[in-house]
Amino acid sequence: MAFDQIKLEILQLLTDMQNQPEDKHEIYLSVKEKLNQMKATGMPLPDDLVKLEHELEEEFASDQRGGQ
């Protein structure tokens, strides 16, 4: 998959995250999957998306610890 196509898909996922906050975790998993696709093909990972992935990961880990 071409870099531009993955980039467009990630942008759509981010838009979905804003418009559908109740699906935030599903969208996070999709962003993570797209970043993994980029890694697997040797594409450079955009720093802002890597940062977003880490922030969401921390948020969901915090939610899980708080819910136990």
Image: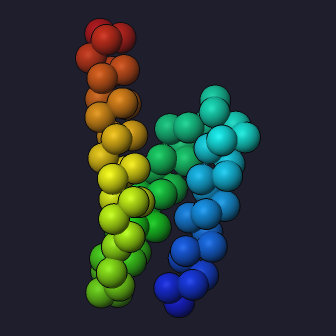
Q: Is residue 40 above or below residue 66?
A: below
Residue 47 coordinates in the image, percent (x, y): 33, 65
Residue 64 coordinates in the image, percent (x, y): 33, 21
Instruction: State which quadrant residue 62 falls in.
Output: top left
Q: Is residue 32 above or below residue 28?
A: below
Instruction: Classify residue 10 as left or right of residue 54.
Output: right
Instruction: Classify residue 26 as left or right of residue 21.
Output: left
Task: Specify how the rendered protein is coloured.
Answer: rainbow
User: Is residue 1 among the parts visible in the rendering?
Assistant: no
Q: Is residue 50 above or below residue 46?
A: above
Q: Residue furthest front?
A: 48
Residue at x 50%, y 38% (from the top left corner) = 25
Residue at x 29%, y 34% (from the top left corner) = 58
Residue at x 41%, y 60% (from the top left corner) = 49
Residue at x 40%, y 50% (from the top left corner) = 52
User: Is residue 44 among the parts visible in the rendering?
Assistant: yes
Q: Quadrant where the C terminus lies?
A: top left
Residue 40 coordinates in the image, percent (x, y): 31, 80
Q: Is residue 57 above or below residue 68?
A: below
Instruction: State which quadrant residue 65 falls in.
Output: top left
Residue 9 coordinates in the image, percent (x, y): 61, 69
Q: Nearer the viewer, residue 58 or 64?
A: 58
Instruction: State which quadrant residue 66 falls in.
Output: top left
